Amino acid sequence: TILSYYSDGLSRDEIVEALEQLLNLGPSAKRNFYREWFELSAKRMKQEGSPCEKTLDRVEKLDLSNVSQVDEIYHFFRKNTRTIDFWLNTCVFPREMQQFEQRMVGNAWHLAHSKANAIVGFSGTNDNHRLLPLQVKQFFPEDTDDIMWRQLFGTNGKMLDVILKNTIECTELRDGSPSTHPSTHPILDAIKGVDAIIDSGALFAGTNNLDIAKAVLQQLPQEEEFQ
């Protein structure tokens, strides 16, 4: 999550939220935090010849009611790692990672707990039976002529059989880390003529879904039925 923010940067609303939190701090704290922000962005301001090097050099000069100034702050600070860290620590983590003294938790062991041992369940496969709670036992008669049981015997390998019989092609991706830009992503570079992509392995992690969709649409036939 943190790396994705470092890569994509903050939105304008997130920058404003961070500024609001910063300006609510005490005088010394906000000066110290903003000094770290400014030191990381000052070099870029100088390279671009921006007057912000002088107009944004102190936290006392910040004015959230000044729209043009907020635009400049967004431009120079949206990918500033110190700004992102501050926003995460003050706006995201306290809200999303808060802990409680008491909480309710339920897992398979809790669900299977029964004083009367009245536990009944069903699964189409038995490959995970060794992970069942100790009070749950698998019932799987191996010597039976019941057609229902005979059909269940093959379910463990049925999906593998379907994949092997219906796989058209396997493509080995080129070496290197996946790109966050769809135009250079190894998966989109390797596939041609597909109608859908099912990313079951999270291979597109870190890539914007909208950008991926646009890139896939460009590879589809341009007939009217695909528009």
Image: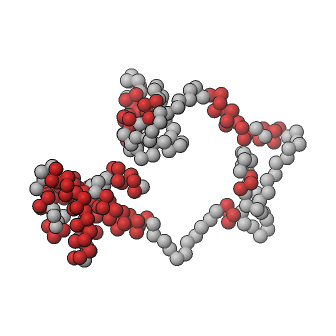
Residue 164 in sight in this render: yes
Instruction: Please indicate whether residue 203 sits to the left or right of residue 53 in the image.
Output: right
| Vertical relation: 200 (above or below) 35 | above
Q: Position of residue 62 (x, y in %)?
A: 17, 66
Quadrant location of residue 63?
A: bottom left
Residue 20 position within the rendered picture, expressed as x and y whole percent measured from the top left: 25, 67
Q: Residue at 72% across / 38% down in the picture? A: 157
Which quadrant holds residue 142?
top right
**For residue 60, above or below residue 55:** below
Q: Nearer the viewer, residue 79 or 103?
A: 79
Image quarter (top left, top right, bottom left or bottom right) of the C terminus? top left
The structure residue drawn at horizontal position 72% and vertical position 41%, both measured from the top left corner, is 156
Depicted 100 relative to depicted 139: above or below: below
For the residue pair 87 and 223, the one nearer the viewer reads as 87
Q: Pick the residue in front: 43 or 190.
A: 43
User: Where is residue 114 drawn, in percent x and y?
Assistant: 75, 67
Name the residue at 79% across, 57% down.
Answer: 137
Q: How many marks?
A: 0
Closest to the observer, 120 or 162:
162
Left or right placement of residue 201 versus residue 210 in this view: right
* Residue beneath the point at 72% across and 47% down: 127
Residue 149: x, y in percent? 81, 42
